Amino acid sequence: MKFNTKAIHGGQKHDIAYGSVMPPIYQTSTYAQTTPGGHKGYEYSRTHNPTRHALENSLASIENGNFGLAFSSGLASIDAILKLLKPGDEVISTNDLYGGTYRLFTKIYEDFGIKFHFIGMENTEHIEEYINNKTKLIWVETPTNPMLNIIDIVATVKIAKKHNVLLAVDNTFATPYLQRPLDLGADIVMHSATKYLGGHSDLVMGALIVKDKELADRLYFIQNASGAICGPQDAFLALRGIKTLHLRMQRHCENGKAIAEYLVNHPKIENVYWPGFKTHPNHNTAISQMDDFGGMVSFTTKENNYQEAIKIVENLKIFTLAESLGGVESLAGHPVSMTHASIPKEEREKAGIVDSLIRLSVGIEDKEDLILDLKRAIG
Ligand SMILES: *Cc1c(COP(=O)(O)O)cnc(C)c1O
């Protein structure tokens, strides 16, 4: 099956009770047993739920994995990965990463004795300098948030395999429509399904997808033992979202390109971050591992003034000023005061997250309207 077909049918069966085409929302905590242990594979909904299973099978299918796991949020799914580790273990992570991931690593797991190295991975050779016999996980986010850097997954896979270290890729920005890390050799794909997979800004959810059975079993154990599962209603919504992922992504990419090209020619704009530009430092890597460049675009102004950036995001009318991304509607954010406020200024600026940086999640409206909106707001 090719991708568009998988997005709709991958891992799906019609409901056995009445043939409903969409899986019913099994809004139940428990399942009747005929005799102790006599059940149809479902005992308790933290452990198993048919609606969640339908979604997990779809997730596995679209990422070309064998096993999918759905969690109550993206961060809950990252939390499950970290529970594979023990005190003393070390993690090497992208330095330009989702603020909440950074907070989870440094404010929770450092206290449990896990050591994190945050490094620029655009040049993957740096990674090896930080590997020692305690290194257990390499954490890659690509494209990165909000700088849209691209990290070479194949080169990172080589390093991870050579040193027998797990490699997890946060594939939230690209989605499997554009990039399939498991095919490139990564061990775990993670999603904030809150974003493009759900796609309609109506749920919060996380997902993990793996190929290896043993790794899947350890993660299922953690999912059940820690309990951060998603509910059946949200599973249904995410499954519905995935069925149009390919159509939405196509338009996100088209609109993202139009807006990046508009901004790069604007006299008040200093830098535009979008991996589709030939001048983007990792453009060739983007071409080699992505099928298109996505709908995320970040930019800075020539004045690099905090107040000016705030005014721009306040003046936008079609772009909603909001956290999050990946929905059908366009959103704008100011990382320094919003998503990345929890990252210390010095760390932030090292990664290029300066006062005037604005991040756009370009939606699937008419691009002409989006460009007019930006024109009005930037002046
Ligand atoms: C939103 C996001 C997360 C966290 O996911 P939640 O669903 O908000 O918990 C992690 N990584 C990236 C890249 C994100 O955009």
Image (tube, rainbow, N blue to C red):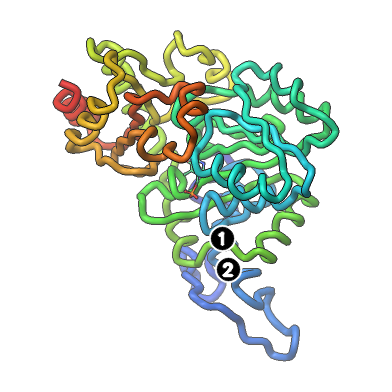
Q: From the Cβ of disc 2, is ligand 1 less than 8 Å away? A: no
Image marks 1 and 2: residues in contact by CB distance under 8 Å: yes
Q: What residue do we see at 54% from left, 15% from top?
A: 282
CA distance separating discs 1 and 2: 6 Å
**Residue 54 x, y percent position in the rendering:** 56, 60
Image position of 249 (left or right of 376):
right
User: Is label 2 in a helix, a strand or a loop?
Assistant: helix
Looking at the picture, how far across and down is residue 43, in whole percent?
66, 78
Residue 143 appears in the rendering: no
Q: Nearer the viewer, residue 313 or 295?
A: 313
Q: Residues within 10 Å of mark 1 (few under 14, many from 20)?
A: many
**Which image quarter holds the N terminus?**
top right
The image shows residue 362 at horizontal and vertical percentages of: 33, 33
- Disc marking residue 50: 2
Q: For the point 65% across and 53% down, which residue is it?
A: 80
Q: Nearer the viewer, residue 105 or 51?
A: 105
Image position of 53 (left or right of 187): left
Residue type for callout 2: Pro
For residue 187, the mark is none
Instruction: Indicate the amino acid at tag 1.
Output: Ala
Mark 1 sits near ligand 1, with its Cβ under 8 Å away = no
Residue under label 1, please give it.
Answer: 54
Is 317 situated above or below 258?
Answer: below
Quarter holding residue 245:
top left
Task: Using residue 72 as the reference point, say whether residue 273 is left or right of it.
Answer: left
Write the residue at 42% across / 51% down. Answer: 241
Residue 201 appears in the picture as rendered: yes
Name the quadrant containing residue 273.
Answer: top left
Quadrant where the C terminus is found in the figure: top left
Q: Secondary structure at mark 1?
A: helix
Residue at the image point whose x is 17% and y is 37% from the top = 317
